[in-house]
Image (cartoon, rainbow, N blue to C red):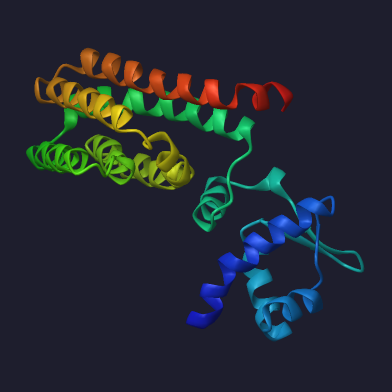
Amino acid sequence: MTLQEKTFLPELAVYLFSAAKEAGGKAPSERELAEHFSVSRGQVREALAILEAMQVIERRAKSGIYLQPENWGLETMAFYARAGIALEPKQIFEAVEVRRIHETSAAEMAAERATKENLDRIRNILDRSEASIAAGLGLAELDHEFHLEIVRATQNSVFLKICTSFYALSEQRLKLYFNTPERSRKSHMDHCQIFDALVARDARLSKALMNSHLRGTASYWSEILGNSHEKA
């Protein structure tokens, strides 16, 4: 695909998601999509082929184009998250739960495997976090950096690839979570304690501190989305 067509792909995906959700899962036709975006049907067809390969949609002969969210994998969910489509409440709870499972293990492993370079990068992230808080900017982006560096410190490249895609699911939510200075300061304090435990090579304490840190995140989303989750 050309650069223009690649740029068009996320817009098409977002529109498909919105239109299909209102129509019981069925998306607009190739002709309707071409008219909506003022592009050729060939461009639409190529973009749909990519989305079909990603299992975002299914094209059924003589029937039309349908979303198939039940087949979406982590990469597909991350693609939609980057495009600006929020997860359903139930998916958010599940994502937070999965994050807590893998990050507590990551902290334990990192305490045993982190290199000097890993620890230096984490220290740099903490320094920048402190400066960001002082400037009133919050930790939305730096929080990702901190947690991913801990996963990187496990020296497990597959684990890192999985988590990189997984964290894309929470990019939009982090902006909401860190919309108050108090929450940024509390998170930074937790990060500093976790870092000290990593430096001390205390795997048990690193795991416990990470678990406590993420318990606060889970409680926040339970409070915000509790009613929606009960209805899901």
Is residue 167 left or right of 7 when viewed as pictured?
left
Is residue 145 left or right of 170 when viewed as pictured?
left
For the residue pair 205 and 191, the one nearer the viewer reads as: 191
| Residue displayed at 34% across by 23% down | 104
**Is 11 placed above or below 109 here?**
below
> Percent from the top left, x then y, of residue 5?
56, 79
Counting every numbered tag in the picture gives 0
Image quadrant where one finds the C terminus: top right
For the residue pair 80 and 57, the one nearer the viewer reads as: 80
Is residue 45 left or right of 160 when viewed as pictured?
right
> Percent from the top left, x then y, of residue 184?
29, 32
| Residue displayed at 25% across by 35% down | 150
Regarding residue 80, the answer to whether it shows in the image is: yes
**Is 105 placed above or below 62 here?**
above
> Percent from the top left, x then y, of residue 7?
51, 73
| Residue displayed at 54% across by 54% down | 84
| Residue displayed at 26% across by 44% down | 137
> Percent from the top left, x then y, of residue 225?
59, 27
- Which corner quadrant of the image does residue 119 belong to? top left
